[in-house]
Image (cartoon, rainbow, N blue to C red):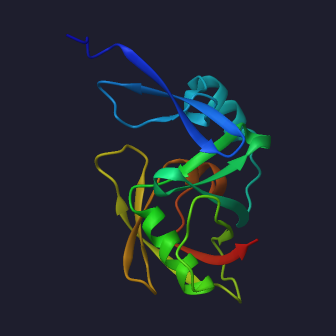
Amino acid sequence: MVNAGITLLFVSKVSDDLNIVYNKTMKDYHSMPLNSWWHLPKTAQKAIAALVPKRSKWTLNCKRHEFDVWTFSLPQFLTYEESLCNGTEIVIDKWFERLTGEKPKTGSAMAMTVSSEPLEDHTTLIDFKRDDVDWAGSTIYRDTVLDLPIWLCPYLQILFKGKPDQIWVKFTPLG
């Protein structure tokens, strides 16, 4: 019998040239790269978060990986392959298909500009709905065009230094 606290390691092919080791426990089925922001000690996370400049607009280059997950990296803030998940990947898939006329596949890429101030050429607007009671610090937004929920982890609050009531989003397919 496997002890619930035992950590199981497995390797997943995430891109054509990069293997990342994922950490998965029997207690916590949420897996993430070992070099992820979330594996840094809390003191390191707080120190780096304090260095992130307060900006109203960020552009994230997102890439779709196997298992239908979109990720972004901000290496200057020790963030690698941060997953956009829990329903957010479905919204990104739908926007990719609307903008390109093609279904997204592993390797598809889009720039996603997010802003807490109006963007003249935004693709959609997402509205804050509520805090997620199951994942401390996470939030639920709603895409006002697609009328679909978007789940955002606490990393959003690091970028915006809080939870904006509205976020304007511009998607631009890459490649």
Q: Quadrant of the C terminus?
A: bottom right
Where residue 94 sits in the image (x, y, percent)? 48, 77
Q: Residue furthest front?
A: 16
- Judged left or right of residue 57, residue 142 is left
Residue located at (70% from left, 61% from top): 60
Residue 66 appears anywhere in the view = yes
Q: What is the count of numbered marks?
A: 0
- Residue 165 visible to the viewer: no
Q: Quadrant of residue 18?
A: top right
Work out which residue is located at the far right of the displayed protein and give it.
76
Taking the spot 62% from the left edge, 24% from the top edge, the residue there is: 43
Which one is nearer the viewer's eye here, 49 or 90? Answer: 90
Q: Position of residue 100 (x, y in %)?
A: 62, 83
View extreme (left): residue:
1
Q: Quadrant of residue 156?
A: bottom right
In the displayed structure, 110 sits above or below 98; it is above
Indicate the quadrant containing the N terminus: top left, top right, bottom left or bottom right: top left
Indicate the position of residue 91 as horizontal and vertical percent values.
Answer: 46, 72
Q: Residue at x 69, y 75 (%)?
A: 173
Q: Does residue 7 sit above or below 28 in this rendering? A: above
The residue drawn where x is 65% and y is 60% is 62
45 displayed left or right of 103: right
